[in-house]
Amino acid sequence: MLLRLAAALLLALVLLPARAATTTIELWHAMDGAHGEYLGEIVKRFNASQNEYQVVPVYKGSYDDTVAAATAAHLQGKGPVMVQVYDVATMNMMTAKNLMKPASQVLAEAGEKIPADAFAPVVASYYSDGKGNLAAIPFNTSTPVLFYNKDAFAKAGITAPSLNTWYDVQEALLKLYEAGATRCGITTTWPAWILVENTLAWHNEEFATKNNGFDGANAQLDFNTRLAIRHLSLMTTWVKSRLFTYSGRREEGEAAFTRGDCAMLTASSAVYGDLVRNASFRFGVMPMPYYDDLSPSPHHTAMGGAALWTMAGKKPAEYKAAAKFLAFVSRPETQSFWHQNTGYLPLSAAAWQMTNKTGFYEKYPGTDVAIQQMIGKGGPPGPYSRGVRLGNYAQIRAIIDEEIEDTFALKKPPKLALDEAVRRGNEVLTRFAQGNAAAPAPKPAKRK
């Protein structure tokens, strides 16, 4: 009897439909703090939405560290299926054909479709090849805005500040200092991106030839223009007058503003979420100032941020898992969640409308400023509003930062610093163009 029962149970188990094994893949990323927590929540929601695939997010440090780690691992036949890569490395990723597999191909092979309007054209085009195929999936996208300390302004008797132009900002800075309302007037994060790249984009001026690098790897920098010289000269004058405080090349300025040391900050719109959490004062958000004597109205600011790339040489099941996750990330619901909690931009009209219906923008005034800047008043985004896509651009941006630092330290006049930045940066671009034309990307080791 017992033998018959055991046999029956064994037969029943054999006849049960086999459950597909779960495919697990890693996503290497550079999101720390609150941004890392919300990325983790997105991954958690994806994993819970189905039982075939699991994504494991792995924090690898800074953007530079993340790209370097993924590249090194890939050449050893290891590493993640997906990696978050910041915008300045886009050209390098697109030209390294053996390093990545285009997102459009990954999605197509897996039978996953992303609607054509999933991403705003200005965002999609940045991560697309010449034929309009997505090389990567846009994820965290931002643009610079102006934050100001409402409490410090109120102390100076400024209750409804007009900060439309840089001349308006200067007037407010003088009032703040006369009232003793602040120790530091204004500071910035990411100086090369904000003070140079976006100043030119905001006024619809060229940063580099070849359509700011979008039309070829042999572009050359030419941002040492009258506008750039004028803006850096004004900032240097403010440094001398102690109206402007240089805080560092990356996010150090955000910390100074959050502490209440500085009354104003130019920074990524994505700073909003951190300020809500950490600032002990009321703050407001304004569009980036512009020069009204050079342009009757500003044009568009350029985007920054990062995208999700799929690495080459992975298994079909792993690519299918990646395709499912990339499609999930592209949904309006996911975009809206990410936007509302981080300050990064909603990447589609559907995500914006979804957010708008919740009353989010009325509840949190200023969260739509970055969106309006990207839409702009000058018509559709022009060739200089999409951003900069150049080879080895991380090195070039470091050069620009170094020259800006020399200017703020009063070691070089602004024009000489910008001329030197262009000359040195073009040497980097020339080497990149020569290397890209002469040698293919290195092939990774075979997977074991």
Image (cartoon, rainbow, N blue to C red):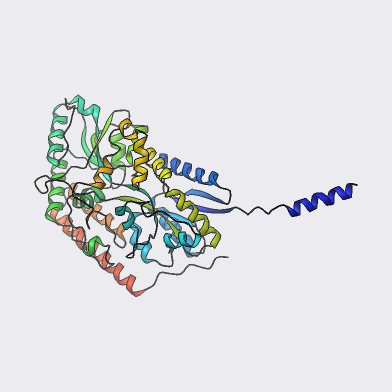
| Residue 252, percent from left and from top | 31, 42
Q: Nearer the viewer, residue 426 or 215?
A: 215
Q: Quadrant of residue 208?
A: bottom left
Reply above or below: 270 against 228. Answer: above
Give the residue at x 49% y 62%: 109
The quarter in which the C terminus is drawn is bottom right
Q: Is residue 343 visible?
A: no
Q: Residue furthest left?
A: 293
Check the image and report above or below for 168 versus 47: above
Image coordinates for residue 123, horizontal then vertical, percent? 32, 53
Query: Can the viewer see residue 254?
Result: yes
198, 123: nearer the viewer: 123
Identify which residue, 242 or 93, lies in the foreground. Answer: 93
Q: Position of residue 307 (x, y in %)?
A: 38, 53
The residue furthest bottom is: 438
- Residue 238 is left or right of residue 367, and the answer is left
Placement of 420 over or under 372, stated as above or below: below
Picture coordinates of residue 441, whole percent (x, y): 40, 69
Left or right, 425 with respect to 9, comes to: left
